[in-house]
């Protein structure tokens, strides 16, 4: 079990509120798709396919979902349009539960890995630094000692923003002067954390989506330098994606997973968009667990991604 696993009533309310724009968008489209129909037939399924694709679920995942619904309609012989949202909810939840990793745990901190090192990657503007701050808050709230490393040394604003979050949360931020070697900052961050018996170190990295070779070389160098301090670091490479960009988030996921060994995803800014369906597609397509979703500006608005709760909130009554 992760340390952020408990799903409270307040978290459910935040999830429902955060997904309200997507839910309204999806339900409006589904209502149009089944208008005048009493049972689910080929025309309804064609319309539903269009609904899912235009809701940023993605083509491949949409085709999987439609195939499952077709099989269910064939098996049950007669499925009414009033049952469609229930079936859709069940089949999407089942698909995501089957094809991926364990659900709803966030980051688990093994006792034999201290400090636990999380390297955060992603393009500028996706909410990377904010996600780091909120993660640090959650770890600290759980009683963990946290250090932050400002290894995005190419933008003064990135370092300043991380320092502000560090002060807000009450955790130390390791930084160097602008233009310093990011790997050097990572080295100092891990060294300080280790010397001070920290539980978690979160390293921010540059958000430039430069050509793949340079990106790979830079991230590889940071990882190699980390290993000099903590031999199996980083334990997690978290890619932060902006959910409001829809299909562009898929493209960023492809770029970064090709450039480095991403093993966790966070999808942010879902509260301000009707493109929340992108989480379903990304969770299905990349076989990398979506660990967190961002549902607002508040410090508590970063939630562990729970597939079934997410789908229930999106397609619930």
Image (cartoon, rainbow, N blue to C red):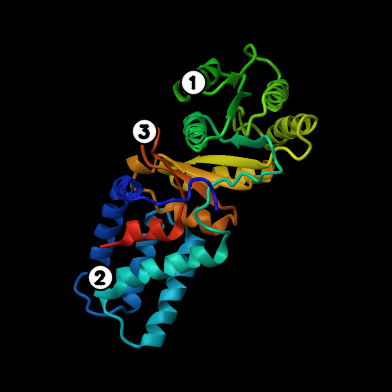
Badge 2 marks a residue whose secondary structure is loop
Q: Which of the two labelled residues, at mark 1 and mark 2, occupies the earlier sequence position?
A: 2
Nearer the observer, 105 or 59 = 105
Pick the quarter of the image with the C terminus: bottom left
Nearer the observer, 42 or 31 = 31
Q: Position of residue 193 (x, y in %)?
A: 67, 26
- The answer to whether 287 is drawn above or below residue 172 in the figure is below
Residue at the spot of label 2: 34
Counting other residues with Cα less than 10 Å from the Cα at mark 1, is it few (<14), some (14-19), or many (20 or more)?
A: some
Q: Which of the two labelled residues, at mark 3 and mark 1, occupies the earlier sequence position?
A: 1
Mark nearest the camera among 3 and 2 is 3
> Horizontally, is 275 left or right of 208 in the view?
left
Is disc 3 in contact with disc 1, using a CB cutoff of under 8 Å? no
Q: Position of residue 213 (x, y in %)?
A: 72, 35
Q: Position of residue 184 (x, y in %)?
A: 73, 21
- The answer to whether 41 is drawn above or below residue 266 in the figure is below
> Horizontally, is 76 left or right of 68 in the view?
left
Is disc 3 in contact with disc 2, using a CB cutoff of under 8 Å? no
Is disc 1 in contact with disc 2, using a CB cutoff of under 8 Å? no
Residue at the spot of label 3: 298
Q: CA distance from mark 1 to mark 2?
A: 47 Å
In the image, what residue occupies the spot 39% across and 69% down?
Answer: 90
Badge 1 marks a residue whose secondary structure is helix
Q: CA distance from mark 3 to mark 1?
A: 15 Å
């Amino acid at each position: 079990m992760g340390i952020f696993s408990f799903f409270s009533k307040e978290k459910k309310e935040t999830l429902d509120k955060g997904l309200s724009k997507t839910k309204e968008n999806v339900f409006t489209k589904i209502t149009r798709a089944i208008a005048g129909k009493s049972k689910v037939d080929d025309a309804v399924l064609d319309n539903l396919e269009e609904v899912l694709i235009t809701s940023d679920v993605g083509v491949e995942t949409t085709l999987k979902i439609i195939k499952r619904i077709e099989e269910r309609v064939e098996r049950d012989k007669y499925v009414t349009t009033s049952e469609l949202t229930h079936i859709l909810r069940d089949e999407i939840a089942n698909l995501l539960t089957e094809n991926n990793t364990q659900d709803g745990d966030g980051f688990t901190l093994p006792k034999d890995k201290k400090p636990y090192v999380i390297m955060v990657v992603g393009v500028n503007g996706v909410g990377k630094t904010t996600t780091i701050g909120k993660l640090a808050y959650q770890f600290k709230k759980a009683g963990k000692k946290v250090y932050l490393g400002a290894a995005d040394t190419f933008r003064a604003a990135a370092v300043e923003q991380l320092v502000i979050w560090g002060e807000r949360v009450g955790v130390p931020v390791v930084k160097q002067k602008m233009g310093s070697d990011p790997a050097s900052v990572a080295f100092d961050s891990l060294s300080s954390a280790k010397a001070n018996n920290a539980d978690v170190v979160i390293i921010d990295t540059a958000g430039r989506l430069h050509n793949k070779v340079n990106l790979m070389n830079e991230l590889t160098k940071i990882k190699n330098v980390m290993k000099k301090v903590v031999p199996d670091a980083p334990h997690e490479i978290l890619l932060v994606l902006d959910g409001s960009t829809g299909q562009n988030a898929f493209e960023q996921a492809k770029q970064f997973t090709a450039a480095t060994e991403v093993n966790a995803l966070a999808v942010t800014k879902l509260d301000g968009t009707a493109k929340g369906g992108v989480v379903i597609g990304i969770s299905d397509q990349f076989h990398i667990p979506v660990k967190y979703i961002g549902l607002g500006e508040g410090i508590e608005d970063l939630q562990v991604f729970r597939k079934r709760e997410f789908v229930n909130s999106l397609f619930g009554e």
